[in-house]
Image (cartoon, rainbow, N blue to C red):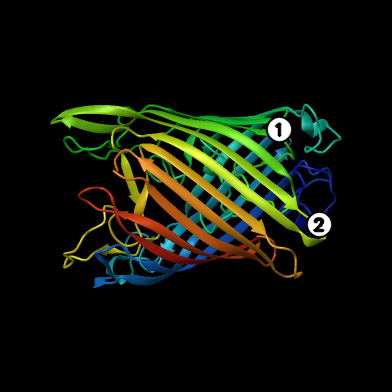
Amino acid sequence: MQLATAQDSTYKIPGSKPAGVKVGNGLYFKFNESGTQYLKMNIWLQSWIRAIENNPGTAVNGQPQNWSSDAGIRRMRIQLYGQTSRRFLLMMQVGMNNQSFATGGGSGTGANGAGKKAPFFIHDAYGQFTVFDEGLSSSKSSSAAAGNNSLYIGTGLHSWNGVSRLTNASTISLLTADAPVFNWPTVEISDQFTRQFGVFAKGNIDRLKYRVSVNKPFMTSAKPVVGGPAVDNNRGNAIAYNGYFDYEFLDREETPNAFFSGSYYGKKKVFNVGVGFLHAPNATMSQPVKDIYKSHAITTFGADVFFDTPVGSLSKDMSFTLYCVWYNYNFGPDYLRTTGVMNPGTADTAYTGIKALEGYGNSRILMGTGNIWYTQTAFTLPKFSEKLRIQPYLAYSYKDLKALNQPGNYYNAGANFLFDGNHVKLALEYGSRPLYNTTDRKIFKRAGEFLASVQFWL
C-alpha cells in the first residue's frame, strides 16, 4: 500500500500517477501500481462562534436575552470512498452536526447538559457501478476530451439530489460561511440530512452532465389542523423522483462524489447552466374541514447559473465567482417552514410584546410554497502573501411565499481568509433577516447575526 497526501484538485481518481506526487484533495491510499484499486479519505471540521440578535421574546437557559453568544460544531465528517476496480466504487460518510452549548446533544443528557454527547451517524452509504465511461480509456484529460460519455448507477443511502447545483453543494467548499439551507427542500424532514434511500444514475453526454434518482422518503406524520396549512405527512408512502442537468460551456468539473464546489479560486474557468426538479407524490397533508384529509405532492423546480474564472494577471492569482438560482417550491397550500441553525433560544413566558411568526432565538422563515431567488458572488483579492488569501463575498435571498403577506429580503456579507486554500479557512460574516408579525404576517423588524466559522480539512 502506498500513501500520498492531497493538494491538487485537478487530478482525477482513478489514475496512474505514482505515489508521492500531489493527487486529488484528501488522503489517497493506492493499492496497486495502476491506481485502479484505491481508498480516498477526507476528514473535516467546521467550528462556529456567533453573536446572535434574538427574536423578540427569547430566553436562553431560562433567562431573557436580546443578544446571546454561542459556540459549537456545525459539521464534522469522516468520508471514505474507494474501488476494487474501475467498475465498482463504495462510498461511506459518517459525522455529526449542529452541536452547541444548548442543542444537538444525544438522548439521556437531560438537565445535566442539553448539548452534550451529540449523535454520530451515517450520512452516505452506497455502492456504485460503472456501466461505461469513455474517459477511462482516453489518453486525453477529461477537460479536453470530446465525446467523453459516461453512465454510472448506484444504490444505498445517497445524496445524488435534484433541483439545483446548490442542492448538491460541497459543504467543505461553500462560497459563504454556510449554505442558506432552503437549497435542501426536504432537509431533516423526509431525508436524513439531505440523504434518502434509493437508486441513482449519473454521468455525462459530452458536455451535458446529469444525475437522476428514484428514492423512498423517510416517513413523516405531522397532523394538520382544520383549515390550516399543509404539513409534512407522507402516509401515501409514494416514491420520490429527482433530477439535475447542467451543461458545461468551459472547463469540465470532476465529480467523483455527489458534491459540487462553491469556488475553484481561479484554478478553473467554469460556466455552467443547469435545471432540476424534485417530485414527491402524497408528501404533505392538509385538513380542509374536520376529519377530511387531503394529500399534496411536493413539486420543486430549480434553474441556476454558475460562473467561476481567474481574473487578470496569473501572478496576482485573482478570481471571480457568481452563482444564481431560482426555486419554485410547491409543498401544498400555505406550507411554511421555519428554522434556526443551532438555535439556543426558547420562549420567554413573561414576554408581552410583539412576537415573531418565526419563533424564538435565531429562527427565520426558511422556505414554503412560493418562489425563492438566491445569488452569491465573491472576488479573490490580488495575491499579497504566500500564507494568506482573502475572498470577500455577498449573498442575497428573496423569498416570495404564499403564506406570507410580504416578500422577505435576506442579506449576508463576509470574507473568507484562506490560509491553505480552503483546507484551513476562516469565514467572517454578518447576516440580516426579516421578522414577521404573527397577526398580519408582514415584516415588523429585522435582526442580525455575526458568525465566525473556522474550517480544517485534510
Quadrant of the frame with the C terminus: bottom right
Secondary structure of the residue carrying tag 1 is loop
Determine the image quadrant of residue 315: bottom right
The residue under the point 29% across, 71% down is: 65
Q: Is residue 311 above or below residue 288?
A: below
Q: Nearer the viewer, residue 307 or 71?
A: 307
Q: Position of residue 410 (x, y in %)?
A: 43, 53
From where the camera sits, is residue 265 visible? no
Residue displayed at 58% across by 63% down:
415
Q: In the image, which is nearer the foreground, mark 2 or mark 1? A: 2
Residue drawn at (36%, 62%), measured in percent from left and top? 447
Looking at the picture, tell me which residue is in the foreground, 199 or 368. 368
User: Residue 134 lies in what quarter of the image?
Assistant: top right
Seen at 65% across and 57% down, the residue is 379
Q: Earlier in the sequence, mark 2 or mark 1?
A: 1
> Farthest residue in the left direction?
290
Residue 120 spot, x, y in % from top left: 46, 56
- Mark 2 burial class by Cα count in 10 Å: few <14, some 14-19, many 20+: few
Q: In the figure, 348 relative to 210: above or below?
A: below
Q: Amino acid at mark 1?
A: Arg
Q: Is residue 165 left or right of residue 254?
A: left
Which residue bears the numbered disc 1?
87
Type of amino acid at the residue the image marks with label 2:
Ser
Q: Identify the element where label 2 is drawn.
A: loop
Q: Whole-percent x and y of residue 414?
A: 55, 62
Tag 2 residue: 313
